[in-house]
Image: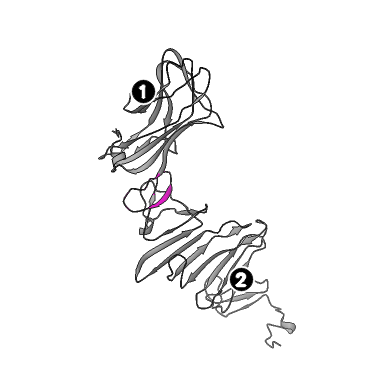
Amino acid sequence: MFTNPVIGGENTLIRSAIRSPDYVAGVSGWTINKDGTAEFNNAVFRGEVLVTDPDGSYVRIYDENPGDGALIEMGLPSGVGVTQTPGRLFTDTSIPFFGMPGIVLESPSVDGAPVAVISLGSNTTSDTSIGLMGATDIRHQAENDLDLLAGNAVGVQLTQPDGQFNVTGTRLISSFDGRMRLGPDDGEVSRGWVAGAIITANNAGVINSEAVQLSALDGAGNPFTFRAGRAYKVVVRGGVTTTATASPPLWRLKKTNTGGQQFDVWRTACTATGTTFPATYTTGFRCDPANDVTAIIVLTLTAPAGVTIQLTGAATSPAVLDIYDDGIADNTYRSGLPVLV
């Protein structure tokens, strides 16, 4: 039984608050209020701390395995999914992948979906290491190469596709579409899609002329800056029709327009008139070894006199021109590609 006049029988708080003499809100002292709120300057808790929300979400801090370190468990709102696995952040004396002391972050999971795991650890006998499991689509907001392990990351975000891999001292090399890929710090790793074009309806027919059919731009709709000394793979997909089988459609890959630098030329065999034939082709080029080049790469179509040729596309089968960074142009295949200047 409490005998202090602030507290009455049955352990009931009968005053608006219990406060220290020096209590000033947000400045000093402490208070325990009748409405259940409280304010302290510092506090030490032995055991478990549980913070709940009316929506069912919670944060729980406790020691799951004594000797390993504290664990922070984060639960989702109760209305999300049928079954849930909470997210967790904890220290461990032997983290996954590396068997060294470190920190592990596990994503929450709903209805049995895979859990993404990120392990961070280091010790006196190895470099700092990052392990990623059940992940990893890593994106950032910088245009140029970004060395995440150097600590200069800008706006890094982790998402969770399927798959598993480990990273031990490997550089994360950015691509210009905002994605980051794993590879040695030698520039060999391709950086994925960098520019392209797409149509979901038929282009106007070409008669007795050469006309641009697709113009590859970056994700923001601007000319792309191709990097000095790198190789680029070009993929063309779509359909084509002709009014004369004796004159197969003639395609060209060029810079800027029909009068620009040409990288490749090819034909599509059409064995019947009025029928759509697949126009699929893969080619490539490399950028000037000494200079970056900002350019629009175009696909042109040429038709002879009296013949109408048409690039076709639809919502379910669009015509596309895609350009991918294919790494440094220093091997036999890449060094033999035409040079963009």
Tag 2 residue: 50
N-terminal-most mark, 1 or 2: 2
Which element type, helix, strand or loop, lies under badge 1? loop
3, 163: nearer the viewer:
163
Location of mark 1 (residue): 258
Numbered disc 2: secondary structure: strand
Q: Is residue 211 left or right of residue 185?
A: right
Image quadrant where one finds the N terminus: bottom right
Specify start and end residues of the magenta stretch as a single range.
174-191
Q: Residues within 10 Å of mark 2 (few under 14, many from 20)?
A: few
Q: Amino acid at mark 1?
A: Thr
Q: Nearer the viewer, residue 68 or 317?
A: 317
Question: Residue 178: within the magenta?
Answer: yes
Magenta stretch holds residue 147: no
Residue 183 location, x and y as percent? Answer: 37, 52
What residue appears at the point 54 percent right and 70 percent down from the top-left corner? 71
